[in-house]
Amino acid sequence: MGGPGSGTWYRWDTRRVIDSVDCLDVRKLARHGALREGVHASVAWRRGAEHVLEWTCESRGIVLQYRARRAGGEWCSVHQEIAVEWVRTGFGMRALLRCSECQRRVALVYLSDRLLWVCRVCMRLPYKSQCEMVEDRLYRRMMKIRARVGAGLKSMDQPVWHYPKPKHMHQRTYERIGTQAEEARGLWIQANTAKLAWHLERFAPVGEGVSWGEGG
């Protein structure tokens, strides 16, 4: 039965999603002390000397220097300034970036087709789960639950009760998670069965009136 990738979303001409775009995370910069005024650093986001992002932290934000190119185009040097704001939370101060396009405060910015770092909304980037088929979402949820009881890499033809309980897991916990896993497995099987029935109904008329007798 089809797993992830058997749906129609997984095509070469599909819409880009968040996971496929270069990303700059201000939380990681803050953890590494890269947001202190006067800090100058660089990071490679891909292999190759061209994919090096340099930044300098100033009082108004961070100044980015990097080389980038559009698909099939020439490499060009890009200079961009992004404002940084510190917001007080219940866990201390948190750094956020101001999107250069819409001025929203965000933690993540992405490299757009115009070679500038902007937020997800400005790039109209969907999450991967928003582009998945129903059966793919159900499969991902089922595997996540099965992994909690040690059945994530086991055959999906067998219920979780077919495999031994993970060591040190309470029996009541095992039964609760196992029940959830079997409910998710049932929904996934139903979705795949419905998908198969739809394909059979759609393509069955193609073979009507065709003789499948032996040649000769």
Image: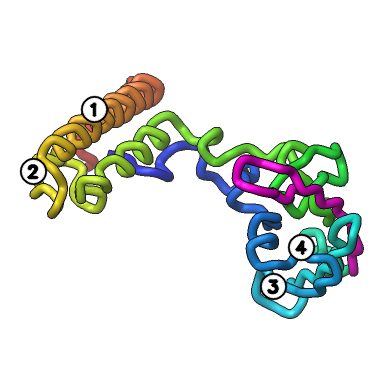
Q: Amino acid at mark 1?
A: Glu
Quadrant hosting residue 111: bottom right
Q: Which residue is mark 2?
A: 162
Residue 33 in view of the camera? yes
Please tell me how crowded label 3 is: few (under 14), some (14-19), or many (20+) other residues with Cα within 10 Å: few
Mark pair 2, 3: CA separation: 47 Å
Dot 2: what SS?
A: helix
Number of the front mark, 2 or 4:
4
Q: Are marks 3 and 4 in contact (CB under 8 Å)?
A: no
Q: Which residue is mark 3?
A: 44
Q: Are marks 4 and 1 in contact (CB under 8 Å)?
A: no
Identify the mark at residue 131; answer none if there is no mark: none
Q: Amino acid at mark 4?
A: Leu
Residue at x 87% of width, y 42% of height: 101
Number of the front mark, 4 or 1:
4
Q: Amino acid at mark 3?
A: Ala
Mark pair 2, 4: CA separation: 52 Å
Q: Position of residue 39 (x, y in %)?
A: 81, 72
Q: Amino acid at mark 2?
A: His
Residue 210 in view of the camera? no
State the extent of the magenta-drawn residues as a range: 77-96
